[in-house]
Image (cartoon, helix red, strand yellow):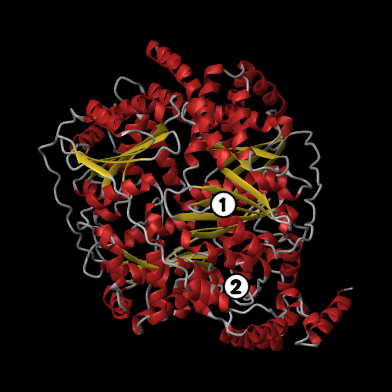
Amino acid sequence: MRFFYMLIFSLLFACVGQQADYPEFLRPTEKSSAWLLDIKNSDTLQFSIPKINTWETANGIKIHYLPNYELPVVQVSLIIPGGTYLSRQMGFGSVSAAIGALMRTGGAGNYSPEEFDLILEELAAEMSASFAAENFQASFSCLNSEADQVFALFSDMILSPQFSERRLDTWKIGQLDDIHRRKDKPSTIASIAFQQLIYQDTPYADISDSKSINEISRTDLLRLHRRFIVPNHAHIVVTGAIDHKMVNAMIAKYFSNWQVSLNALPELLQPHLNTSPGIYFIPGNYTQSTVYIGQPGAKRLEKDHYAIQVFNEIFGASSFTSRLFQDVRERKGLAYSVFGGTLVDVIPGRNIIFLQSRTEATVNAIQEAINTFKRIQEKPVGKDELTQVIKNIENSYVFNYDDTNAIALRKAMVELKKYPDNYEENYLQNIRKVSREDVLQVAKTRWDLNNFIILVVGAESAYTQLESAFKGIKITKLKFNEKLEL
Amino acid sequence: MLTIRISFLLILFTGTLCFADIRETLNKFQDSVHYAELNNGIKIIFYKRSFSPVFSANISVRVGGVNEISGQTGISHMLEHMAFKGTKTLGTKNYLAEAKLLARLEKIMQEADAGNQLSVDQKQEVAEISMELEKYRDLTNTFEKIYQELGATDINATTSSDLTNYFVSLPNTAFNAWCEIESDRLTEPVWREFYREREVVQEERRMRYEDSPDGIFYQKMLLNAFEVHPYRNPTIGYIEDLRRHTATEIDRYYRDFYVGDNIVISIVGDLEFEQVLDKVKKYFSRISAKSAPERPKVKEPEQKGEKTFIFYTNAAPSLMVAYHKPNYPNPKDLALNVWLEMMAGNRTAPLYRELVLSKKIASGIGYFEAPGTAYPNLYILNATPQKNHSNKELLVEIDRILMREIENGVQKEKLQNVKQKMMVDYITGLQSNLSLAQQLSYAQQNFGSWKLAFSWIDEMEDLTTDKINAVVKEYIKNDNRVVGYRERSK
């Protein structure tokens, strides 16, 4: 039967060029490709950034307000400068990992932890708090009819968290379990290990482990709270179905007595990084290798800030169209997940290439990715290539402003992170100025092939391949328990 | 406690008002949705939202894992990947020349068992054809590049057991372009780079399953829960099947299922319905009006006793308990959903409160619906034991708590809270254009009407403690469940 089928099929292809013999997808089309030119000439969207109502309270909190009455919900966020980077620098260790969760779950105001959980559920409100790298952020969302009650609970959480010992114990147990499960996923192992290899023994590679988690005390939480959770330079973002008068009233009622701290936070110190380039390997029982290639990167808002954005889109950040995606995945079929770029940060960020490829293709995939990088470092990008990416950034910029809450949060973040005045208004203008030479300079000056770290989490046979392909280069085997044992 | 009691009474009162607010909001949404059908069966659903000059579009095709026959698993998902490879005019410099090469390539692959038994000569020929094909690939005019230039975000697609979705968000000035691109994709796709993409999908499979203890555990749960129904198979397919797909098979599958009757287009954003309808009619009317194959009429036999399996792997233990249930719009589904939300959906739910907060034997517990929603399916409770506790111990405690709750019955106050929370979560999710577009097409495809995206709220309001208690007794029992233990290999 199979032979018969093959015979029929081969007869179908015997008369190449005759329409009737082609399976449908191989038959010619009568459609011209002129339509492609037409759509490329689509009008460019002209839009203006929505105006946000902003004012400052007597105790220095900046309020950003943008109403939207389509749905009967209200969203509020509080952002305070000073995050995990600074708290670790100041010796708080893993406490910043705990404080957000314990503010939310450890009871607040006159409510025990259980009462606080219950009342939020009864009000159908969501509330959370956490420390990010550079700031503290807390937020809630609820029906507008409950806004006043939920705002009261929110202020309790911010101003008077109880940090219940019981809940701290529960949190610790959960964290220890998460740490214990880190080794279950190669991508988790790789992400943590790469962080440690880049940032070494600085606070920026200070990954929590069972010791640091167990050491956290209620006193530590109170100390961190007193030091960091202050109205100095704080921003509150309010959006949704709520009017200006009510916003003013609630802020006054719940946050006007919040005392400014006279004890300013120190400046964030810039790390002195002493990364050791080379190939590193963490063995495991996997069918794929998880690979990070990279090195310390650039800081935010340096003179090539906009060129870096464009470089990233061309090289590896733009998921379907980037060079990495096209070369490693589309052309060679070597990976499903592949991306890369220069991640800027308030401290030196990271240059990253990430991919996951089947074990037997580990070396091919790494070499393909490095070759992709070499091409962008050796020759300027194409004129059309640059034009397309800049057009994409221009035409997609509107999506930073398609959601009320996102718009107002973005404004707050831009100010908090000390972006220049009118950063958003001037962003596209600055992007348009980026030239092919600028992009080439990013590749040449920000990336250094001789100083790459290549980290592979994979099967033992991948190690053998690496040894054979990179003869003469030391491959260091690493041990990963809760984190890298360096 | 007195404070809590008083606050509850206030909440009960305001809760009633909240339902009214939510109902009013959803009525406004419903009244503002436009619906139309083309002659070829395509359904169009549109909601205008003019906050920002953008729109999101979701094209849903009623095909997924459930339509696949044995030996062909993963073909719906493979087709979804291939739909990004361009068309007869998009992504090619010379389609005629390309087609001849693709024909030669396909012939070789068919002869050599989908390319798995290539001789040395055949490998050589395939390599030469592939190099030739590169010359005709127009990388400046690919699907993604054009969308990128237009300012697209959210470009992606998903395949589930029941449906395949293609979605994108664009500035509203690009609506015409969207119509051109998507209608071209649905009428003249070309399965170029098929055999390379087959490798990519296998990488995806490795990432999600072979190297993911959670993924393999879930796959085993489905195999144990469903003995005959195609819901037992992973949507991504088994690797053995993935290695055997051919471009010809994909083409046949595409022509069977990507027909007007199977397609729903939903658009949310700053456009006008008349303009949308006009353009969609112009571009999408040429899609085939052929009838799509009916969904398989497979009935999973009733499970008549508890099933258990143990999966050993190099990962920390985990527990899954799956209960068979009817799917929405059977009202029993909503009753069970609400009950499980009460049991495990939040911090005050008994399973979370007792197992995580109080006894500290679980580090987490939750539930989810699986694997699809077009047929009777499962609710799965998923829990992870703390380091010095076992799955068995966890199951004993879960059973104890659930039996107690079933015996005590649902409390009115708790029911009120959960209903309100679920509704508020739902309407908060409607803020996103894309999410709303997907909700509308999902309801239309799976339940026969987009209105069910909103009307389930009425059913929610009507749900009583008695109704829930009766349904829970019917379905939450050992005879109706599959218990999966994931244990660390010795």
Q: Residue at x 22, y 28 (%)?
A: A252
Q: Is residue B395 left or right of residue A210?
A: right
Q: Nearer the viewer, residue B55 or B351?
A: B55
Any part of residue B489 in sight: no
Q: Could you tell me which chain the residue with mark 1 belongs to?
A: B
The residue type indicated by label 1 comes to Phe
Against A45, residue B332 (above or below) is above
Which mark is drawn over residue B273? 1
Classify the position of the C terminus of chain A by image quarter. bottom left
Classify the position of the N terminus of chain A by image quarter. bottom right
Residue picked out by circle 2:
B86
Q: Nearer the viewer, residue A129 or B480?
A: A129
Q: Nearer the viewer, residue A42 or B254?
A: A42
Residue B147 x/y as whole percent: 50, 67
Residue density around tag 1, few if under 14, some if 14–19, many if 20 or more, within 10 Å: some
Residue density around tag 2, few if under 14, some if 14–19, many if 20 or more, within 10 Å: many
* Distance Cα–Cα, label 1 vs label 2: 28 Å
